[in-house]
Image: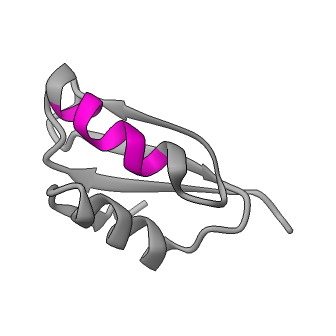
């Protein structure tokens, strides 16, 4: 499957938040790599996908207790 990159606006804004969402994203099937730019005002979550859909990513991050929306690119 083709690898894709998605970017989302989130409210993951500190190291503690990143630590909270880490097990959810690390366990999500189809996520190759992810990172959150907590210095960006939109707290941009970038995900390199290997099969996971945007909807599945949104559900995963919401399960961790965070707000997330697709970033207009």
Per the image, is 20 magenta? yes
Q: Is residue 59 left or right of residue 29?
A: left
Q: Residue at x 13, y 47 (%)?
A: 11
Query: Where does the image place residue 73, in percent across and percent down from the top left?
Result: 43, 60
Number of callouts in the render? 0
The quadrant in which residue 12 appears is top left
* Quarter location, residue 66: bottom left
Out of 63 and 47, give the one closest to the viewer.
Answer: 63
Question: In x, y percent, where is residue 7?
Answer: 43, 53
Q: Does residue 14 sit above or below 26 in this rendering? A: above
Location of residue 65 with respect to 56 vertically, above or below: above
Residue at 77% of width from left, 57% of height from top?
Answer: 3
User: In the figure, 7 relative to 54: above or below?
Assistant: above
Q: Is residue 18 magenta?
A: yes
Judged from this view, the residue extending furthest toward the bottom is: 55
Q: Position of residue 28 (x, y in %)?
A: 53, 57
Q: How is the image coloured?
A: one colour
User: Looking at the picture, does residue 2 appear above or below residue 20?
Assistant: below
In the shown orientation, is residue 38 left or right of residue 23?
left
Looking at the picture, tell me which residue is in the foreground, 48 or 15: 15
The span shown in magenta is 17-25
The dominant secondary structure in magenta is helix
Q: Could you tell me which residue is drawn at 86 percent across and 68 percent down?
A: 1
Q: Is residue 27 left or right of residue 60?
A: right
Residue nearest the observer in this picture, 38 or 72 = 38
Q: Position of residue 50 (x, y in %)?
A: 73, 58
Which residue occupies 66% across, 59% down? 30
């Amino acid at each position: 499957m083709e690898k894709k990159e998605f970017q989302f606006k989130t409210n993951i804004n500190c190291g503690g938040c990143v630590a909270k969402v880490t097990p959810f994203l690390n366990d999500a099937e189809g996520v190759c790599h992810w990172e959150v730019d907590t210095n960006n005002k939109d707290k941009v979550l970038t995900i390199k996908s290997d099969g996971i859909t945007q909807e599945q990513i949104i559900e995963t991050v919401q399960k961790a207790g965070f707000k997330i929306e697709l970033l207009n690119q």
